[in-house]
Image: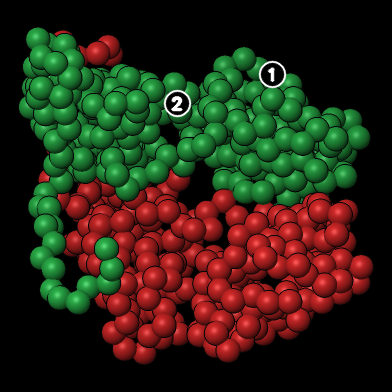
């Protein structure tokens, strides 16, 4: 190819739909979250290791067919009303993940990102705005690990992770000599989960207008803690971990 | 839930609108930028601590009602003509922030991200493309500090910040031992604001194909400086701060 020297008619595709060849011997039901198998590019009922491509517009029965014998038709972009476990009215804007073709959650662990909450309908039911091509998981590239116990001590193998806290947690940070880049993420509904980032005795947690105090935690204030609050911490500073980015109210314990 | 074994009709919601219950005793006027109170999930005329939800499609008068007595109908996604202080023709693509339900600016400080300038209309007037759910503030997660003085010396408590420069500025960087992570952001119209990242005497600023020189600034060239040019710097390297990301023309003095 080279630069144009004449008008060229481009095929501009209408609509927010797509057709993808299916894997062999499977059925994708209407309404299913559809994933593509990374190794083959073929579609199937979404699993936790797939890429999300949209929702099936109509059933595609390839139960007796070879791979790619049929195409599934999917809606790639729009808003869908879904059951999302634990959803409450303060969750508008939260990222939503699918763990299979009909299970939707807020926890990134073991899920595939599909979109963001647009509207709260009722307890556990929300409208989710999805765009399988354009929207990007805010935690893409990090390994998500759920922390449901009360404590965790980080080491260098926790670098690159998102630690998803679903209950009050004290996370003991690695000493300054340990290179660590980690995100502590609040996954509890509004006002229910407190995260304490606990430096070792000789360290403090410093950040934007946060002086820090040796051996004092940086705490996500529980009363106003929101699902999606986070602190992104990095080691390397001589006095202890420093905040790179954060969301929500975080303060040094007194 | 478990995997599907039968067709399931999903409610696919049409249009780019939303309805959100309104806070008690307030009025949201047509055209208002609407915010969501984080603690309650209810809508109100946007304030600087809210989440942007869209623009009000028609007036919602809940001045005598309880919380959630009425829903406000909002447009969540689209393009809208707005007054933006200082907007010029070179500002297409810039992020736009709201400081209340009717004030729109380029400065992230004290504002809520709403979208990106799409088309220049006339001085101070632009079309803004917004998507309250899908678009993300490019500076989300950082504390934004406006710098309107000519100098600033950074320390460790500036880590995690965006230093938003509205006039020509020399920013003195801390010594290498201070491992801060900071963004210097140019917020002047095209060709009007020069930012100089000034290292410590025995340090240099190194970056992509930038060797750096001890005690010489890395400068956002004034003649081609653009609103939105930035320099993301990290301390911790033995010879001085290093560039993580940058936009615009930056050269060692």
Q: In this figure, which colouring scheme has been used for the structure? A: by chain
Respond whether the residues carrying marks 1 and 2 are from the same subunit: yes
Residue A225 visible from this viewpoint: no
Picture quadrant of residue B80 = bottom left
Query: What is the chain identity of the residue bearing mark 2?
Result: A
In the picture provided, is B176 more to the left or to the right than A42? right
In the picture provided, is B98 more to the left or to the right than B54? right
Query: What is the chain identity of the residue bearing mark 1?
Result: A
The quadrant in which the N terminus of chain A is found is bottom left
| Vertical relation: B165 (above or below) A43 | below
Q: Indicate the secondary structure of the residue bearing disc 2.
A: loop
Disc number for residue A107: 2
Which chain is drawn using red?
Answer: B
Of B45 and B186, the residue lying toward us: B186
The picture places residue A111, in percent across and down from the top left corner, at 40, 24
Residue B65 visible from this viewpoint: yes
| Vertical relation: B251 (above or below) B177 | below
Picture quadrant of residue A50 = top left
* Alpha carbon separation for disc pair 1 and 2: 18 Å
- Residue holding disc 1: A151
Which residue is at a point 59% across and 65% down the rendered structure image?
A: B246
The quadrant in which the C terminus of chain A is found is top right
The picture places residue B30, in percent across and down from the top left corner, at 22, 66
Chain A, chosen colour in render: green
Task: Looking at the image, tell me whether mark 1 or mark 2 is earlier in sequence order.
Answer: 2
Which residue is at a point 83% across and 61% down the rendered structure image?
A: B240
Which residue is at a point 59% across and 76% down the rendered structure image?
A: B249
The picture places residue A186, in percent across and down from the top left corner, at 55, 32
């Amino acid at each position: 190819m080279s630069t144009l020297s004449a008008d060229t008619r481009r095929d501009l595709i209408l609509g927010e739909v797509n057709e993808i060849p299916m894997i062999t011997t499977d059925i994708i039901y209407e309404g299913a979250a559809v994933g593509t198998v990374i190794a083959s590019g073929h579609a199937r009922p979404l699993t936790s290791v797939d890429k999300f491509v949209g929702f099936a517009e109509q059933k595609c029965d390839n139960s007796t067919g070879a791979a790619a014998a049929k195409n599934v038709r999917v809606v790639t972009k729009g808003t869908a009303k879904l059951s999302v476990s634990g959803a409450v009215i303060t969750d508008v804007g939260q990222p939503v993940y699918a763990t299979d073709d009909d299970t939707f959650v807020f926890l990134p662990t073991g899920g595939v990102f599909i979109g963001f909450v647009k509207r709260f309908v009722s307890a556990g039911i929300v409208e989710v705005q999805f765009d399988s091509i354009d929207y990007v998981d805010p935690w893409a590239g990090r390994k998500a690990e759920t922390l449901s116990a009360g404590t965790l001590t980080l080491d260098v193998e926790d670098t690159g992770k998102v630690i998803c806290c679903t209950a009050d947690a004290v996370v003991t940070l690695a000493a300054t000599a340990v290179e660590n880049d980690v995100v502590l993420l609040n996954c509890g509904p509004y006002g229910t989960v407190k995260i304490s980032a606990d430096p070792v005795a000789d360290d403090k947690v410093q950040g934007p207008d946060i002086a820090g105090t040796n051996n004092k935690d940086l705490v996500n204030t529980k009363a106003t803690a929101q699902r999606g609050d986070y602190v992104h911490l990095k080691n390397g500073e001589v006095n202890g971990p420093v905040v790179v980015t954060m969301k929500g109210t975080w303060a040094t314990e007194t | 839930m478990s995997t599907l074994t039968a067709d399931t009709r999903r409610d696919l919601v049409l249009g780019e609108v939303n309805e959100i219950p309104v806070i008690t005793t307030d009025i949201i006027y047509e055209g208002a930028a609407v915010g969501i109170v984080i603690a309650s999930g209810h809508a109100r005329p946007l304030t600087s601590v809210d989440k942007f939800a869209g623009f009000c499609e028609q007036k919602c008068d809940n001045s005598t009602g309880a919380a959630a007595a009425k829903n406000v109908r909002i447009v969540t996604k689209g393009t809208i003509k707005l007054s933006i202080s200082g907007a010029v023709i070179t500002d297409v693509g810039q992020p736009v922030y709201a400081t209340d339900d009717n004030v729109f600016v380029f400065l992230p400080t004290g504002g809520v991200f709403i979208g990106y300038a799409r088309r220049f209309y006339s001085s101070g007037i632009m079309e803004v493309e917004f998507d309250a759910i899908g678009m993300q503030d490019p500076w989300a997660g950082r504390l934004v500090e406006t710098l309107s003085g000519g100098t600033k010396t950074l320390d460790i408590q500036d880590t995690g910040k965006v230093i938003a420069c509205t006039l020509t500025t020399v920013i003195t960087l801390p010594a290498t031992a201070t491992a801060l992570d900071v963004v210097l952001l140019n917020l002047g119209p095209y060709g009007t604001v020069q930012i100089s990242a000034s290292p410590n005497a025995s340090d240099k600023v190194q970056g992509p194909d930038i060797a750096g020189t001890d005690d010489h600034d890395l400068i956002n060239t004034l003649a081609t400086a653009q609103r939105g040019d930035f320099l993301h710097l990290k301390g911790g390297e033995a010879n001085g701060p290093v560039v993580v990301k940058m936009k615009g023309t930056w050269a060692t003095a």
